Each structure stands twice: as structure tokens, then as C-alpha cells.
Amino acid sequence: MSSFFKELRDGSERACALVGCAFLDHCLKSLLENQFITLTRAENKQLFAAKGAPLADMAAKVDLSYAMGFFTKTHRDDLHRIRIIRNAFGHAPRNVGFSMTAAIAEECSELSINTDPENPVGDPRMRFIIGTLELAAMLKVAKDYPPVGKITTVGNALVGSGFTSALLKKTSGPLP
């Protein structure tokens, strides 16, 4: 089992929220860097790490990635929910938990995770973990198959000449 998943599953609730969100933030940064020209270390720092850097916070990375067509509104909203949950844990002066705090439990219940409708996942921490893993997988696909041209959505699916088409070609062979 990966150490990342083990930390999400077995670590404290605060560690789960902070580590899960930090990983997604890293994935978003990597996704964006993959689309940029080759930057020097100093230029990269000016974009992502310097005081007042335009892409220093996760919200900016989420919104820019969405505007570039990497994922749907549903994914954008879920990434913001994960960020909000992380902030609730990170800024709490006392011990909080996924089920102990109504606002955190509500955000977790709003995550659009893929589960069996016959056996929905109600546990807020497990919903957070599943949501984090699904979003990480989606960001990996988005990095490997970046959008090309105009992307539109139909329901939760991305449609266009971007990574969805490339993924279909890669997994199913040539499109007819």
C-alpha cells in the first residue's frame, strides 16, 4: 500500500485533510507547469512561491486549470471543497474531526465521489479520502492528455479535442 494512502487512512484526521489537500495542490502545480514554457527556478518561484505570487494558493491553481479546460465544473467544485476542508482543519485552534464539525461533514457530503448507489459512502472521512484519490487520478489523466482546442462539458464528461479524445484513442484504439 502506498505511504500516501496509508497516511490518509491511518493518520490523524487533521493529517488526513492536510496531506490529502497538499498532494492535490502539488498535482495542480505539476499540471500547470507541464503546460508552461521551461521556466528558470526563479521564474517558477515568482509564479508559485514568492510573496504575492499569482499561483501561490490552491484556489488560483484550481481556477486557472478549470479555465484552461483541464476538468469540469464538478471537479473544480470538489477541489474547492477539499481546499475548504483543509482550511477548516489547518486553522482550527482545537482538535476537529470530519464528523465532529458540522461544516466539515457537510463539505464532505457534497463531494461528487463515484460510489455504488446501492451502498453509498456516508462516513465523511472516507468520502474525503475517496474524493482525494479520484481527483488525484483525474489530475494525472489531465496532465498526460492536456486539452487541445475548445473543451465543453456534457454532464460531468469533458467533450472536445482534448484529453478525452486522446484517452479514448489510447485505450480503445483509433476512433472510427
Image: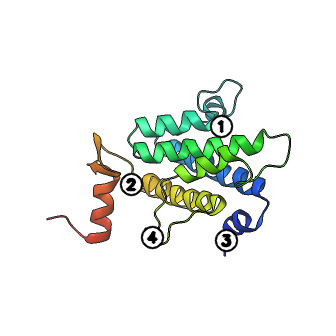
Cα–Cα span, label 1 and label 3: 30 Å
Q: Secondary structure at mark 3?
A: loop
Image coordinates of residue 30 in percent, x first then y, are: 56, 48
Closer to the observer: label 3 or label 2? 3
**Residue highlighted by disc 3:** 2
Whether residue 36 appears in this view of the structure is no
- Spatial distance from mark 4 to mark 1, Cα to Cα? 45 Å
Q: Quadrant of the N terminus?
A: bottom right
Q: Is residue 165 above or below residue 72?
A: below
Q: Which residue is mark 4?
A: 116
Residue at which label 2 appears? 145
Secondary structure found at label 2: loop
The CA span between labels 1 and 2 is 25 Å
N-term-proximal mark, 4 vs 1:
1
What is the x, y in percent for residue 97?
A: 75, 53
Residue nearest the viewer, comparing 24 with 90: 90
| Callout 1 touching callout 3 (CB < 8 Å) | no
| Label 3 Cα crowd, 10 Å radius (few <14 / some 14-19 / many 20+) | few
Q: Tag on residue 41? A: 1
SS for tag 4?
loop
The answer to whether 75 is drawn above or below residue 126 in the figure is above
Could you tell which of marks 1 and 3 lies nearer the N-terminus? Answer: 3
Please rate how many residues cluster around mark 2, counting C-alpha atoms within 10 Å: few if below 14, some from 14 to 19, many from 20.
Answer: some
- Callout 1 amino acid: Arg
Alpha-carbon distance for marks 3 and 2?
A: 24 Å
Quick one: which residue is furthest to the top in this view?
A: 52
Q: Which is more N-terminal, label 2 or label 1? A: 1
The first of marks 4 and 3 along the sequence is: 3
Front position in the image: 163 or 9: 9
Q: Residues under labels 4 and 3: Cα distance?
A: 24 Å
- Identify the amino acid type marked 4: Asp
Q: Which numbered disc, 3 or 2, marks the residue that appears first in the sequence? A: 3
